[in-house]
Amino acid sequence: MTTATLLNNERGLLGELGRALEALERTAGVKGRVVALEPKAGKGHRADALIDLYVEGKKHRYAVQAKTNVDRLAALGQVKARLDQFGERGLLFAPYVTAAIAKECRKLDMAFLDTAGNAYLHEAGLHVYIAGEKPEDKATKPTGTRGGGTATALRVVFALICKPELLNAPYRDIVNAAGVALGAIGWVFLDLEKRGYIAGRQKKHNRRFLEPMRLFDEWVTTYPIKLRPKLNPRRFRAENPAWWKNADLTDLPAYWGGEVAAHRLTKHLKPATCTLYIEPEQDRAKPVGALAKLVVANHLRADPQGDIEILDAFWRLPGDQDHVDVVPPYLAYADLIATLDPRNLEVAKLIREKYIDDALRKT
């Protein structure tokens, strides 16, 4: 299991879940038991565990997604999307869930449980909401992000997920695709191998993904926290709210992300915000760059509260011939998940089903 160090083996997860169920019985009077570890749970997806909760003689079964660290709201969208993939009712388990995160889980109607006795369970015959209980010791408090969550590692992992053949390509090819220093590549591969995400050797050309879906889920959770803030975000507003419909990116190294990307990929979302990724200027001496051209052509004005966000593109990969001006679906999905907007989460599911899951299974 590669969920995290604390839950890195069956005995560890079983013990932590056992503590959480004991705490739930103490705080809410609800008894429970662990039924299985790492079962299949809907459409071939694998949960971390199955648990049964008992209330007035009735059994309530949950498929569990375990996380060691949910101290940031940005992680919840990905957890919610993961739980929705399970055939059983989904439940987030973490060693500790803060009151703020508990409140957000309740807004998302996402069941959760922790070892301090905090919980949200809401279905017919079972209604529990407990927040603010403190962990018994420091060992149950959230831990920091692992080394695999650095901005550099996230760039490399994104390139590998989008183009799996890079796993066995020369390091220079990965450098060009991810825009990172040559010396970083070996460390990223070492980390991925250590954590059970890849196996094999580049020299033998037999590197392969072991857990591509889990790796992508981790990337989606970490991207808005560690990489996105470093992409030089700028905000603008347009005189015409529908400007994006006729905006021409043909001659610009620019790509639609977020809600506009979702609209173009699925036709199921009317964008309320615009996200654009523009390749950074390589030659700052150029009189007019891509961003300036975009601003002038579409009558955009800088506004810190604007509904247009422009970020630096962080990859150099061939685009989809059918959507040449749209970011890779993996990034469009991550943008939507990070918003926690219910309508965006629904469309994110469509993107995942249409463009992502099958591709990851084939890697």
Image (cartoon, grey):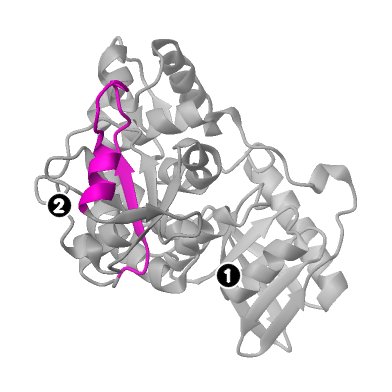
Q: Within the image, what quadrant is residue 275 found in?
A: bottom left
Q: Residue at x 33, y 31 (%)?
A: 280
Circle 2 or circle 1, nearest the eye? 2
Quadrant containing the C terminus is top left
Residue pointed to by mark 2: 248
State the separation of the CA atoms marked 2 and 1: 47 Å
**Image location (x, y in percent) of residue 101:** 68, 62
Report if residue 113 is visible in the image: no
Marks counted in the figure total: 2
For badge 1, the amino acid type reads Tyr
For badge 2, the amino acid type reads Asp
**Image location (x, y in percent) of residue 338:** 48, 56
Q: Residue at x 69, y 37 (%)?
A: 144
Q: In the displayed structure, does residue 287 sit left or right of residue 22?
A: left
Q: Residue at x 48, y 61 (%)?
A: 339
Q: Are marks 2 and 1 in contact (CB under 8 Å)?
A: no
* 324 over 184 or under it: above or below: below
* 127 over 312 or under it: above or below: below
For the residue labelled by badge 2, is the local secondary structure a helix, a strand or a loop?
A: loop
* 190 over 21 or under it: above or below: above
**Image location (x, y in percent) of residue 216:** 41, 44
Residue pointed to by mark 1: 62
Give the mark, 2 or 1, whose residue is nearer the N terminus: 1
Residue range highlighted in magenta: 271-297
For the residue labelled by badge 1, is the local secondary structure a helix, a strand or a loop?
A: strand
* 286 over 126 or under it: above or below: above
Tag on residue 295?
A: none
Quadrant containing the N terminus is top right
Query: Does residue 31 belong to the magenta stretch?
Result: no
Local packing at callout 2 (Cα closer than 10 Å; few below 14, some 14-19, many 20+) is: few
